[in-house]
Image (tube, helix red, strand yellow):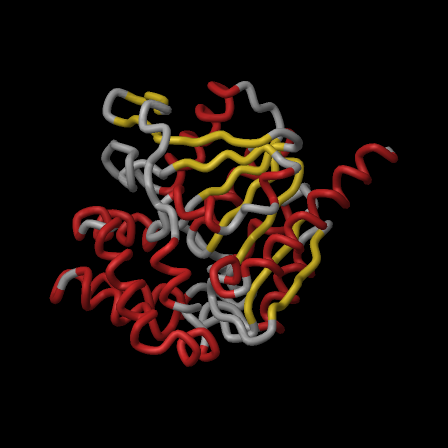
Amino acid sequence: MDVQTIKSFDLTYHGINERLRVSDDCELYYELEGAGPCVTFVSTIYVVSTSWRNFTRSLVRNNRLLTYDLRNQGASSGAPAGFDQHTTDLVRLLDHLGIERTYLVGSSLSTVICRDFAVRHPDRVAGLVLVGPTFSPWGSKRRTRIMKSWLTTLEASGPRQLFDAMYPLVFGDRAQGMGGGAAYLALRERFLAINSAAQLRANLTDALETTADAEMLPRVAAPALLLAGDDDFCISPSGLRALAGLMPDARAEVFDDCGHLPFFETTERFERSLCAFVESIEERQRAA
């Protein structure tokens, strides 16, 4: 995690006209690139969709990648309406694009959206990748307390102090040690540029009101890959394996010396794991 890499990240909105009106007050910004099996990235509330192009340069060579901003995020409009609405929005986006089945990739809080979508629309999910899932086999009390503290920090002191509260938790020891103060400042600049206080407040409030317990996981029929760093503040390696054990067809993979965002801290390994997962499911389908 070096400062030059962070500053080189491309977060620009290239196809600003690619929008879908999903309701009277909401248009979703999306980008669709590549050819092959469709892989849809569902952004978490503090990572905009354009970030993904920096972590999928190998994946896009053999796959069709769909990225989009959630409502009330980035270049998407619309009032916050709860995590259930995010699931409905995704259905409408896939219908608009004629995508019958897709792999879903969720990170952090968006793993909840992916879980709910896979349970409600099993025929549309070819495979599920949950990166740094925020649900735990032992309940969601810790997640809830952390998010309440984040919301309190935001309301009392603003986005800059919120970033200061999140940074030592989200990024692993190795990444922070190697990046130093320069990487911290570069990431803070990017965070403040793409997240308004109003958006963060609304999305954190929505996240607190959703059900993030693991009880729904046994109902996920799609094959699943669960990824997390061994330094993830949200889920331990043993917790990740326990989550995978609750699902009918899932395996866990732990990245050494990595925090909550493996795609950021260990991009090459993240892409290799994701490519291998998609290829294995496609091979399984061909053999069936």
Q: Is residue 95 left or right of residue 37?
A: left
Quarter of the image for residue 72 reads: top left
Quick check: 142 above or below 53? Answer: below
Q: Is residue 5 above or below residue 165?
A: above
Please name the residue shown 35% across and 50% down the image.
45
Location of the C terminus (image quadrant) = top right
x then y, percent, for residue 240: 60, 66
| 82 or 280, nearer to the observer | 280
State the image quarter where residue 11 is shown: top left
- At x 52%, y 64%, the residue is 136
What is the quadrant of the N terminus in the image? bottom left
Which residue is drawn at the image coordinates 40% and 42% (left, top)? 49
- Residue 149 visible to the viewer: no
Q: Is residue 146 left or right of residue 215?
A: left
182 and 147: which one is in front? 182
Relative vertical location of residue 288 with respect to residue 22 in this rendering, above or below = below
Residue 206, horizontal then vertical, whole percent? 30, 48
Q: Image point 19% across, 64% down: which residue?
A: 160
Look at the image and tell me whether residue 244 can be seen: yes
Q: Is residue 72 above or below residue 265?
A: above
